[in-house]
Image (cartoon, helix red, strand yellow):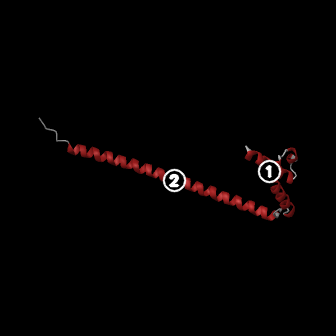
Amino acid sequence: MKDRRTDEILSAHTEALFGHSEELWQVDLTDEEQDELGPLFTLAERLQHSLPPVQPPAAFAHSLGKELAGSARHQIAAARRLRRGVLIGAATVGSLVSIASVIGAIVYIISRLRARPPAQAN
């Protein structure tokens, strides 16, 4: 339960740092929580002030999007080729088994006919 409460407090602090919410100020911190999490809050605030958010150039974002879409298309095509190859292979094996069964049946029938004693004429 303590971990969940700590997660909620840290989430609220993060949201407050980014200006998304004022939830942190609505959370009543115990003295123990303040002692435990205070240094982490201070570090997070210092980092936020010293590391401004970075926005990638639009050209980079556009080229990355094209790259990712192309990669996804290649993966989908490779998966389709593999699936098709497996299907053709399975069909080939199934056909070979059927042919072998027919040949086996013919061999069995012929061997049974040859093994039968000749019919006696009266």
Assign a secondary structure to mark 1.
helix
Disc number for residue 110: none
Image marks 1 and 2: residues in contact by CB distance under 8 Å: no
Identify which residue, 105 or 71, lies in the foreground: 71
Relative image position of residue 117 (x, y in whole percent): 17, 41
Quarter of the image with the N terminus is: top right
Q: Which residue is mark 2?
A: 86
For marks 1 and 2 on the same chain, the one whose residue lies earlier in the sequence: 1
x and y percent of residue 12 in the render? 82, 48
In the displayed structure, does residue 52 sit left or right of residue 65? right
> Which numbered tag is attached to residue 10?
1
Q: In the displayed structure, does residue 30 sit left or right of residue 103?
A: right
Instruction: Where is residue 110? Give x, y as percent.
Output: 26, 46
In this rendering, would 7 be left or right of 121?
right
Q: Which quarter shows the C terminus?
A: top left
Q: Residue at x 23, y 43 (%)?
A: 113
Q: Nearer the viewer, residue 54 or 63?
A: 54
x and y percentages locating residue 15 in the rendered image: 83, 50
Q: Is residue 73 above or below residue 7?
A: below
Q: Amino acid at mark 2?
A: Val
Which residue of the protein is positioned furthest toward the left in this rendering? 122
Instruction: Give the residue displayed 86% in from the left and 46% down from the top.
Output: 23
Left or right position of 120 against 43: left
Of marks 1 and 2, the one in the foreground: 1
Residues 27 and 121: in front is: 27
Q: Residues within 10 Å of mark 2 (few under 14, many from 20)?
A: few
Residue 53 lies in quadrant: bottom right
Q: Is residue 59 above or below residue 36?
A: below
Q: What is the crowding at mark 1: few (fewer than 14 residues within 10 Å), some, or many (at least 20)?
A: some
Report the amino acid beneath label 1. Leu
* Residue at disc 2, secondary structure: helix
